[in-house]
Image (cartoon, helix red, strand yellow):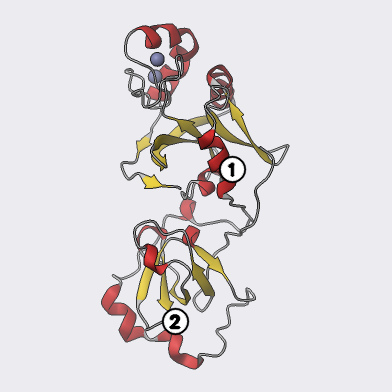
Amino acid sequence: FVHYIAKEMTALPVGARVRIEGLVKAKEHNAKRGTVSRASAPEGRVGVKLDDGGAVLAVRPENLERIDDGRGGTRGKGGEGSNQAGESSSLPPPKKKPSSLEPKQRTLKRDNAILREFDGSPDPNLLVLYYHFRDNAFDCFNSSEYHAQMIRYYESGLSVRLVVPRKIGNNDYFLVGLRHSREDKNALCEVAFNCKRSFSGISMLVKQRCFVCHRAGAPHCSGGCRCACYCPGGCEERGRTDHGRLCRLVRESDVTVEEECMQLL
Ligand SMILES: [Zn+2]
Ligand SMILES: [Zn+2]
């Protein structure tokens, strides 16, 4: 679990040259090139005017790879890239993003190999994918390591703020995002970035399987914390020693649970 790399996420200004990649629903646009024509579209997307006929798409920054020199110049195509009339018909007016969602100037790396390796392993010790800051690498927790780490996070001023469903193949996952109460302590999260979610704080990708018997697809804890999964009854009872304290802490936190489940691979 110490390999990956290869991609940058920085703010994309109007005029930046980009290539589209990793779209799940509109696959036909992958690998197309275009020019950023609007820096801020709904849901943090940017408007991209495609080279092949002038359509403007609203695309998440995670699905754009920058292909120019980073100075934002459009070359070769003259003034064609800024057809205001064309884009206003297909994009609603831009909305201001809250500043906490503004990507910071920091390089993040994405590689699907790490998700594939995590997804492919039945090893119960590979239950939770996290990013190890000191080692600069991804690593995994089992259930008791995850619980111990979550308690440490709470003790150092972080709390769970976000739960986001994700899918790799047919397997279900959820991203648990924690944020420090002091906003300046939060930085863009590598794990969330790999899960196509821009999140400032610390997040972990958790397998939707029973934390005790490891049965795939087990439901979330009946306590309503959304941070762990147990078969109702026996397994949940057995998991209570590990889980009880965290469950209470999370239920007292202000957690947003997103409904939209994005397919990662
Ligand atoms: Zn179970
Ligand atoms: Zn719980």
The residue that appears at 41% across and 78% down in the rendered structure is 49
Q: Residue furthest left?
A: 89
Q: Give the quadrant of residue 190.
A: top right
**Residue 80, relative to residue 139: is it above or below?**
below
Circles 1 and 2 in contact, beta carbons < 8 Å: no
Tell me the quadrant of ligand 1: top left
Q: Along the horizontal axis of the image, is 53 left or right of 110? A: left
Q: Along the horizontal axis of the image, is 5 left or right of 211? A: right
Which label number is shown at residue 51?
A: 2
- Cα–Cα gap, marks 1 and 2: 32 Å
Residue 56 at x, y percent in the picture: 36, 75
The residue that appears at 48% across and 63% down in the rendered structure is 21
Front residue of 37 and 75: 75
Q: Along the horizontal axis of the image, is 6 left or right of 209? A: right
Residue 17 at x, y percent in the picture: 54, 76
Residue at disc 2, secondary structure: loop
Q: Earlier in the sequence, mark 1 or mark 2?
A: 2
Residue, disc 1: 114
Type of the residue with mark 2: Asp
Residue at disc 1, secondary structure: helix
Q: Residue furthest right?
A: 135
Can I make out residue 114 in this image? yes
